[in-house]
Amino acid sequence: MAPSAWKDEISTVALAGACAINTWFCTNCLIDYSADVWALSSEPAEPDRLLFLRNYYSWRGWAPFVTPIFLLLTVPLPILVFNLSRELLASTFGWRRASPLRHLSDVVQALTLIGVILPIGVPAVGRVQGAVIEACAVNKRGKLATPADCQTRAEELLPVHLLMLILNLVMFFCDIAKSTGNRGAAATKDKAS
């Protein structure tokens, strides 16, 4: 049986695009997590900061410029899921050769996006942010109606946003590892020819 073909190297343009998109997602996750940490930095949390958090996530629901960019980035998502699935299967079943780093990066990145971010992370973020908006309702005097419930809901944001930040950093580093993971393979491929 003939040896399987080598996986294609990641082009500089593809790497730059992937890094730009991952930087966008990491930055947004970091800003969300920062807002959570700031609002919950005292015990009990200051009502004005909790109100800020409610207003911030209300704004994030349809932020000018930001939300349309997120929506635009979902357009190529089916193609990305297909390509990640294909690379995952090629690495898992040995259909294509690559360095161990490239195989590991392909597997981790596919499982991170398809197995965690899309089915678990994104719905969890929407759920907890919606719960904060609802629990941190304002009464007629412009104050929080139920500060204790608001703080409880706001505290649920911290682990979810931290998880999303970590997962997006994993995606970022997998792209970098994938681009460097097959460079040695090209030299080996040339020597074998």
Image: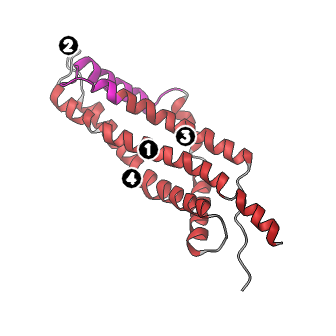
| Marks 1 and 4 close (CB-CB < 8 Å) | no
If you read the primary sequence from the N terminus, does the residue marked by circle 1 or circle 2 appear first? Answer: 2
Q: Give percent across and percent down for residue 141.
A: 20, 13
Q: Residue 166, labelled with which disc?
A: 1
If you read the primary sequence from the N terminus, does the residue marked by circle 1 or circle 3 appear first? Answer: 3
Front of the two marks 1 and 2: 1
Amino acid type for the residue under numbered disc 4 = Ile
If you read the primary sequence from the N terminus, does the residue marked by circle 1 or circle 4 appear first? Answer: 4
Instruction: Examine the image and state in which quarter residue 88 appears.
Output: bottom right
Residue lying at 56% horizontally and 57% vertically, measured from the top left: 105
Q: Is residue 8 above or below residue 155?
A: below
* CA separation in Å, label 3 and label 2: 36 Å
Identify the secondary structure beneath mark 2. loop
Asked whether the viewer can see residue 126, the reply is no
User: Which residue in the protein does label 4 denote?
Assistant: 120
User: Which residue in the protein does label 3 denote?
Assistant: 71
* CA separation in Å, label 3 and label 4: 18 Å
If you read the primary sequence from the N terminus, does the residue marked by circle 3 or circle 4 appear first? Answer: 3
Q: Quadrant of the C terminus?
A: bottom right
The magenta segment: 36-64
Q: Give percent across and percent down for residue 180.
A: 66, 52
Residue lying at 15% horizontally and 29% vertically, measured from the top left: 148
Q: Main secondary structure of the magenta part?
A: helix
* CA separation in Å, label 1 and label 4: 14 Å
Q: Is residue 189 above or below residue 55?
A: below
